[in-house]
Image (cartoon, helix red, strand yellow):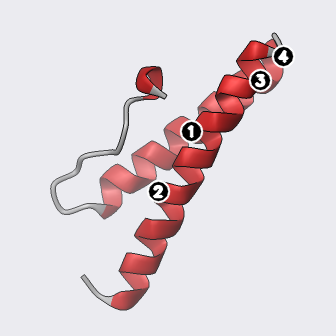
């Protein structure tokens, strides 16, 4: 993996982790619309990670966050 790809992968993994935390917070406060949009961003990030990885696996499933 080249340096640029590694940095992109690390950035995507960080974004995914942050989105998971934000989703938990939005759900805890019952901000349903906000939680929905954060979840969509989380899924998009997961899909991008899956496309970037040679094995095609995403990180942590959302329900385990």
The residue that label 4 is drawn on is 31
Q: Along the horizontal axis of the image, is 19 left or right of 46?
A: right
Closer-to-camera residue (63/50): 63
Residue displayed at 37% across by 78% down = 6
- In the rendered image, the residue lying farthest to the bottom is 3
The residue that label 1 is drawn on is 42
Q: Along the horizontal axis of the image, is 23 left or right of 8?
A: right
Image marks 4 and 3: residues in contact by CB distance under 8 Å: yes
Residue 15, image x and y in percent?
58, 54
Q: Earlier in the sequence, mark 4 or mark 2?
A: 2
- Disc 1 packing (10 Å; few <14; some 14–19; many ≥20): many
The residue that label 3 is drawn on is 26
Residue 24, image x and y in percent?
66, 25
Mark 3 falls on what kind of element?
helix
Mark 1 falls on what kind of element?
helix
The residue that label 2 is drawn on is 13
Tell me which corner region of the image, top left, top right, bottom left or bottom right, holds residue 9.
bottom left
Image marks 4 and 2: residues in contact by CB distance under 8 Å: no
**Real-space CA distance between mark 1 and mark 4, rounded to the nearest whole angstrom:** 16 Å
Mark 4 falls on what kind of element?
loop
- Disc 3 packing (10 Å; few <14; some 14–19; many ≥20): some
Residue 56, image x and y in percent?
22, 51
Residue displayed at 67% across by 29% down = 23
User: What's the mark number on residue 50?
Assistant: none
Q: Earlier in the sequence, mark 1 or mark 4?
A: 4
- Disc 4 packing (10 Å; few <14; some 14–19; many ≥20): few
């Amino acid at each position: 993996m080249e340096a640029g790809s590694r940095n992109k992968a690390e950035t995507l993994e960080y974004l995914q982790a942050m989105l998971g935390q934000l989703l938990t917070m939005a759900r805890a406060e019952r901000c349903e619309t906000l939680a929905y949009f954060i979840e969509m961003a989380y899924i998009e990030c997961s899909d991008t990670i899956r496309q970037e990885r040679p094995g095609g696996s995403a990180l942590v499933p959302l329900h385990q966050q």
